[in-house]
Image (cartoon, rainbow, N blue to C red):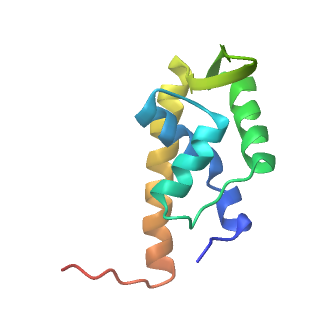
Amino acid sequence: MIYSSELIKGTLKTIILKLLKDNKRMYGYEITQRVKELTHDRIQLTEGALYPSLHALEADGILTTETEYIGKRVRKYYSLSPKGKNVSKEKISEFADFMNTMKFLLDIKTDIA
């Protein structure tokens, strides 16, 4: 099952922040592939969704960028700024709390084995 773009849209920035928190720096295509891998293809980020979010996070001072030349290609790496490190903690915590609230609201029981 692939999740709808509607669900992903509200969580994309948090996904990006978590990946960069865990991996220090990544480039766009690497982010899309890592998300596919970690979610067993259930979340597939498009460039049309990813890059506007990366650019917005960069404009807000949450991400910094580094450009590297790989042969004839230019690769732009993203990493968390000092502000971004704090924001990532806040967003991840907020989302975890939101998930718990949704479980309660939707009366979803989790099995403890």
Q: Identify whether 16 is placed above or below 10.
A: above
Q: Residue at x 58, y 42 (%)?
A: 31
Q: Image quadrant for the N terminus?
A: bottom right
Query: In the orientation shown, which residue stands out farthest toward the front?
Result: 71
Image coords of residue 72 (percent x, y): 75, 17
Q: Residue at x 73, y 20 (%)?
A: 74
Q: Quadrant of residue 57?
A: top right
Q: Nearer the viewer, residue 68 or 18?
A: 68
Q: Nearer the viewer, residue 33 or 70?
A: 70
Q: Residue at x 68, y 23 (%)?
A: 76
Taking 9 as reference, is 77 left or right?
left
The x, y position of residue 27, in whole percent, is: 62, 31
Residue 18 at what x, y percent from top left?
48, 41
Assign the C terminus to one quadrant of the image.
bottom left
Q: Position of residue 10 (x, y in %)?
A: 67, 57
Residue at position x 49%, y 64% from top?
40
Vertical relation: 25 (above or below) 68: below
State the residue in front, 53 or 44.
44
